[in-house]
Structure formats: C-alpha cells, structure tokens
C-alpha cells in the first residue's frame, strides 16, 4: 500500500490520534474525539482499486498472440490517469508467465539525457546480460559487440556536437565510413539483436514497459521512439508505452518542426510506431467514490488481510458488472462505516463536477483537504469536513464566487447562499446576480451551507495561498509559477524562457495558477508581465491569458496596461478599452488604460 502520513480529520469520532512516533494520545477532552486522515504519496499503487484488471488482461492476451510479433502497445491517458499503476499491474501479471522477461524503463529519469536512444538500447542489453546467467557465455560476446556499437555512436555524436575536440587518431577513425558488418557500425545492429534473441530458447517474449514518455523533452521522446522502431523492434520483443498520446504527438511535431513537417505527419509517425492503442477510461463518479472509500479504508482497517478481502470484493463485483462495487459486504470481516462511505461519495460528486477525475487529482485533493482541515483545527475552527470540502471546491474552481462569499457579512452571506442554492436546485428560476453561471452544479450539491458556521473558515482560507491549486501542479510547474511572479527580474526572465519552451499542458497549468495567484499578490505587475510573455510566444493560449487578465482586472497595476499594449497580441490589446471603461479596477490602472486608448485615437 502507499506510504501514509496521518493527520486529524474534522469531526469524525475516535478515541485515538496517531502521533509521528507511533504512540497513542487520548483526545477525548471536552468530549470531542478525532480520527485520522491519510496523506498519500504520488506513487502508483500496487493494488487495483480502479478496475484496471480488464485493461491488463487485454494487454496480456495481445502479447500472447503469435500474430502480433513484434508489437508496440500504447496505454493512453492524461497525466495522473493511472498509467503507471497499469504498468505495475502488468509487470506483476507477466512475471507469472513462463518465458516472459519484463524490463521497465523510464527515459525521463535517465542520467544520460544527451543520448537517450543509446541509453534505451543499453538498458535492454544490460538487462539481458544479467537475466540469463545460465547462458552467460553465449550472451556475453554478442551483447558486448552490440554495446560497442552504441559506444562508438556516442563518440561520433559527441564530437559532432563539439563536446569532444581532441583530434586523436581513434576519433578521426570514428568518422571514417565502415563496412556494414563492422562492429562499430549501427547499420547491422537490428539483425544482430534479432539473432541474439532467437538464440535464447527459453525466452518467449521480451516485454519492455516504457513509462513517463510524456514527461520527456521532445528530442528525448523522438530518441526513445527511434530506439524502439529502428533497433529493438524484432521478433520476440514487445513494447508497452504508457503516455498521454496528445503530448507525445505534440513532442513529435516540435521535434520535427525544423523539417517543415506538421501535426499530420506526427500523427502518422505515432500510428506507425504503435500498432495497438488502448485508452484508460475516465473514472466515473461511482468509481471515484469507491476509490476514495478504499483509500480511506487503508488505515482504518487494522487487519491487512481484512483490507485485502475488501479490495477483492470490489474487484469481483466490478468484474460482474455490479454497481456500486462497495455493496453487499455483509460477509466481509471488516467494512468501511457509513461516515466514510458518505464522505467518499460527496468528495466524488464534487470532484466529478470540478476536476478531471484522475487518480492523481483525487489523491492530491484528499491531501489538500487533510492539510486544510489540520490548519482549521489548529485555529480552533470546528466545522464539518464535508462543508470544508465543498468550500474548497468553490475556492479552487470558482474563485470569483468564493471571493464574493468572503467579502459578505454573515447575514448577507446566508441570504445569498439561500438564493444561490435555490437556483442551483431549480427551486427558483433567476440566478443571483452576484454569482457566475457555471456555479450552478456546485450550489446544488450537498451539504447545505445556509446553516453551517462557515464565517471563521472563510476568513482563514482567504488568508492562505490555495492549497488545492498547488496540489494540482507538479514541482516544476510550482517553481515556474513562483519565478514568473517574482519581483526579481533575472529569475523572472529565466522562467519566461523556460515556460514558453515547455509543453502546452505545462503552460496552461502555469497560466491558470498565475491567474489564481494574482488574487493574493500585493504586487501583480511581474505576474502580468509573465502572462503577456506567454501570450506573445504561445498563440494557442492567447484567449486563456486574455480571459485570465480580465478576471483579475481589479488586482492589476498600471504596468499591466503597458505590457498588454507592447505585447502586439490582439487579444490583450483588445482588453485595454474595456479596462478604460471598467469601474471595478484601480484608478491609476484605469487612467493608464484611458490614456492608452486616447493616444491610439
């Protein structure tokens, strides 16, 4: 099971709280008892909590088909969609098959990012050399010869890039055309590799699992695919690529951009590599609820074998097509209580409406929820956990509406919530003028906030940088956000260069985070400058940047107007007349906007 850290959990009742040193502390003073909530790491789970078994079984069947030899299978899903978990489950299943050798590679983590192609090939060869000790003598010579080809290719590539400048006789010889059968020539690598595998009579399939390809830079993506197609795709070999197909296709297009070939060529290139594409299904609300309940149950079930029986029960019901999967549990020795199941259901409903519903986003929301609950408790705020969850979803997905709630006095807040909830639940026709159109589903969801004491929590949350926003970002994205909003010009400039060279998905996440951060910054000019820089260099994101700047208009300083005007981006320049007429922005900012409009006539 995943590594866990335990924090107190709202008003759920228990007589004990786990300390870091493992001791137990009585928390029954005053009659208020708290149980525990886990923090999950981001590692793939070794348990199938989401019904991936059917995908794994399909891949295993494909690998056993003699008509698919060699074959490359693509497991497609967005980041955090469970691809690494599927690869782990697949590895466990294949290692039980006689004659199957499984190698798991992660090109993103290679030390040698200069020669990813050589690193991929080298990893496979080195694994073969250690995997069959009984055939060491037979393998050592051929593997050594193939590795020598890679080494000489690296020497030539290094010298061509100017990394080796000594003009020794051996280096010069490396550039001398060699016969195809020469050990230092890569032209015959594939046939020699095929011959080596055919000589391994005990090997039925060499299965190479490639993870995190969508995290690699474009050149590394291309190098990995080239290693697969040009050198390793021979009889007895199968590859399983786990990646976001759109991001891989985008990387191919970027890598081939200098050749003048477009997105269509990138699509065909990927289709040529991957013969059998499979997409992981998006998690339904019911499945998300079961997933959350199983995660919460990991700690609350004290017997490991009892928890395993619960997981197996869910898997069996899923295989039979029965829903919900956590039902009919009367025969199990341990089952999650009604509070856990109810909370999991509420979380799932809220996340389905406001997030991607991926396993990673669910874990990160639970982590952010645990941290926010902890902070609230430390400030003496006693509030139902489901209320905190609903307010966190509002803060993360409808920031403007969240700020509206924060600004209102208690009586005004209750009155708005009553109208808002009635509109959301179709009890009244008219939408409250103070809230946004897309908040209706949130307003309709449980729990009812009109009677909840949310004032102290709102004041606390308004003073914090959004934990839920941070939880949805990678560490690299968080670093970019911090640097792009920095008052330090060198840091900001370096980050601007890096972000516009990153993948579109990274840039989109950073734009969203910068917009949200602007609401909590006292100085927004650096942040607005960075948003304008992204818009200049990434046309696809210009509408999103423009919309974001308009949403945070009341936080913008005069410098933002100058950056918009100098950007040359039509979408940003079109905001200036709107800002000149806006009544809810800083007077100095409005004045600069008006002067800019007048100057342009």
Image (tube, rainbow, N blue to C red):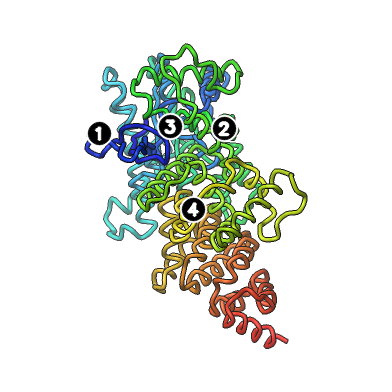
Q: Nearer the viewer, residue 250 or 44?
A: 44
> What residue is pinned by disc 2?
280
Where in the figure is residue 266, as x and y percent of width and height?
Answer: 61, 46
Secondary structure of residue under mark 3: helix
> What residue is pinned by disc 1?
24
Residue 551, quarter of the rendered image: bottom right
Which is closer to the viewer, label 2 or label 4?
Answer: 4
- Structural distance between the alpha carbons of marks 3 and 2: 23 Å
Which is closer to the viewer, label 1 or label 4?
Answer: 1
Q: Nearer the viewer, residue 8 or 310?
A: 8
- Structural distance between the alpha carbons of marks 2 and 4: 25 Å
21 with respect to 161 (left or right): left
Q: Nearer the viewer, residue 308 or 379?
A: 379
Q: Nearer the viewer, residue 52 or 386?
A: 386
Q: Earlier in the sequence, mark 3 or mark 2?
A: 2
Quarter of the picture containing the C terminus is bottom right
Q: Residue, x 47% and y 30% (percent of image)? A: 340
> What residue is pinned by disc 3?
296
- Structural distance between the alpha carbons of marks 4 and 3: 22 Å
Where in the figure is residue 225, as x and y percent of width and height?
Answer: 50, 40
Residue 469's tag is: 4
Q: Earlier in the sequence, mark 1 or mark 4?
A: 1
């Amino acid at each position: 099971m995943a590594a866990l850290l335990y924090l107190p959990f709202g008003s759920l009742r228990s007589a004990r709280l786990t300390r870091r040193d493992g001791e137990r502390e009585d928390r029954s003073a005053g009659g208020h008892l708290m149980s525990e909530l886990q923090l999950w790491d981001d590692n793939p789970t070794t348990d199938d909590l989401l019904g991936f078994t059917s995908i794994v079984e399909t891949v295993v069947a494909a690998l056993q088909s003699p008509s698919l030899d060699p074959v490359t299978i693509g497991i497609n899903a967005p980041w955090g969609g469970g691809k690494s978990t599927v690869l782990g489950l697949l590895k466990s299943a294949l290692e039980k098959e006689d004659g199957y050798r499984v190698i798991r590679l992660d090109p993103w983590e290679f030390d040698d990012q200069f020669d990813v192609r050589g690193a991929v090939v080298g990893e496979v060869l080195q694994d073969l050399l250690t995997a069959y000790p009984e055939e060491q003598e037979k393998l050592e010579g051929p593997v050594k010869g193939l590795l020598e080809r890679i080494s000489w290719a690296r020497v030539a590539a290094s010298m061509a890039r100017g990394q080796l400048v000594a003009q020794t006789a051996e280096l010069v010889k490396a550039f001398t055309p060699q016969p195809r059968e020469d050990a230092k020539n890569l032209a015959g690598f594939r046939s020699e590799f095929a011959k080596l595998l055919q000589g391994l009579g005990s090997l039925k399939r060499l299965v190479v699992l490639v993870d995190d390809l969508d995290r690699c830079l474009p050149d590394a993506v291309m190098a990995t695919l080239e290693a697969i197609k040009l050198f390793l795709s021979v009889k007895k070999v199968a590859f399983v690529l786990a990646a976001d197909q759109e991001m891989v296709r985008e990387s191919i297009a970027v890598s081939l951009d200098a050749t003048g070939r477009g997105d269509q060529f990138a699509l065909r290139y990927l289709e040529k590599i991957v013969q059998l594409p499979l997409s992981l299904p998006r998690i339904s609300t019911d499945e998300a609820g079961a997933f959350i309940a199983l995660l919460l149950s990991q700690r609350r079930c004290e017997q490991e074998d009892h928890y395993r029986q619960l997981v197996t029960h869910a898997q069996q019901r899923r295989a039979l097509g029965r829903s919900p999967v956590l039902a009919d549990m009367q025969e199990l020795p341990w089952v999650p209580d009604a509070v856990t199941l109810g909370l999991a259901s509420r979380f799932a409903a809220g996340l389905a409406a406001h997030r991607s519903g991926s396993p990673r986003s669910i874990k990160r929301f639970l982590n952010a929820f645990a941290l926010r609950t902890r902070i609230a408790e430390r400030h003496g705020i006693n509030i139902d956990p489901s209320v905190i969850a609903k307010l966190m979803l509002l803060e993360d997905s409808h920031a403007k509406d969240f700020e509206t709630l924060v600004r209102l006095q208690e009586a005004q807040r209750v009155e708005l919530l009553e109208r808002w909830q009635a509109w959301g639940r179709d009890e009244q026709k008219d939408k409250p003028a103070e809230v946004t159109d897309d908040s209706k589903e949130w307003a309709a969801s449980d729990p009812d906030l009109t009677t909840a004491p949310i004032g102290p929590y709102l004041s606390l949350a308004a003073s914090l940088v959004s934990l839920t926003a941070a939880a949805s970002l990678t560490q690299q994205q968080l670093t970019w956000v911090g640097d792009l909003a920095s008052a330090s010009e060198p840091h900001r400039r370096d980050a601007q260069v890096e972000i516009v060279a990153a993948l579109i998905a990274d840039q989109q996440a950073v734009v969203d985070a910068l917009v949200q951060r602007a609401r909590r910054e006292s100085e927004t000019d650096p942040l607005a400058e960075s948003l304008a820089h992204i818009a200049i260099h990434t046309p696809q994101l210009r509408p999103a940047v423009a919309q974001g700047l308009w949403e945070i208009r009341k936080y913008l300083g005069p410098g933002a107007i100058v950056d918009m005007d100098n950007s040359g981006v039509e979408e940003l320049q079109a905001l200036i007349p709107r800002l000149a007429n806006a009544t809810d922005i800083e007077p100095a900012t409005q004045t600069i906007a008006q002067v800019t409009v007048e100057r342009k006539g």
